[in-house]
């Protein structure tokens, strides 16, 4: 897991922490919490999905985020 954390920036690590605290968190809330734009939030989430660290379960409206354990 240490090598995994080495590949993540601080923002991505914080996003994972926020998801652990609230699986129903939205990009809007993440953006406000990190004081970044909504687009930046979406881009960081896309990077986490591409790295196979998180996945969306269910719909965009009623779904939740799942952290994938390696």
Image (cartoon, rainbow, N blue to C red):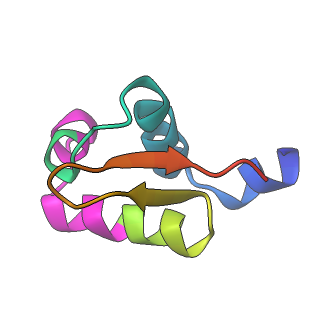
- Prevailing secondary structure class for the magenta stretch in the rendered image: helix
Q: Position of residue 37 (x, y in %)?
A: 15, 57
The mark total stands at 0
Q: Position of residue 29 (x, y in %)?
A: 18, 39
Residue extending farthest top: 21
Query: Residue 23, how many percent across, how many down?
Result: 38, 36
Depth check: 32 or 67 in front?
A: 67
| Residue at image point 28% right, 40% down | 34
Of 47 and 59, which appears nearest the observer? 59
- Does 56 sit left or right of 7 as displayed? left
- The residue shown at (14%, 54%) is 61
- In the depicted view, which residue is nearer to us: 52 or 43? 52
Q: Nearer the viewer, residue 25 or 44?
A: 25
Which residue does the image show at 29% across and 37% down from the upper left? 24
Q: Is residue 33 magenta?
A: yes
Residue that lies at the very extreme toward the bottom in this rendered image: 50
Q: Which residues are magenta?
A: 30-43
Which residue is at 85% across, 54% downward? 3
Any magenta on residue 21?
no
Quarter of the image with the N terminus in it: top right
Along the horizontal axis of the image, is 45 left or right of 14? left
Residue 44 quadrant: bottom left
């Amino acid at each position: 897991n240490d090598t995994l954390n080495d590949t993540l920036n601080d923002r991505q690590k914080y996003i994972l922490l926020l998801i652990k605290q609230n699986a129903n968190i939205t990009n809007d809330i993440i953006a406000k919490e990190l004081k970044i734009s909504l687009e930046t939030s979406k881009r960081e989430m896309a990077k986490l999905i591409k790295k196979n660290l998180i996945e969306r379960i269910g719909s965009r409206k009623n779904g939740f985020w799942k952290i994938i354990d390696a």
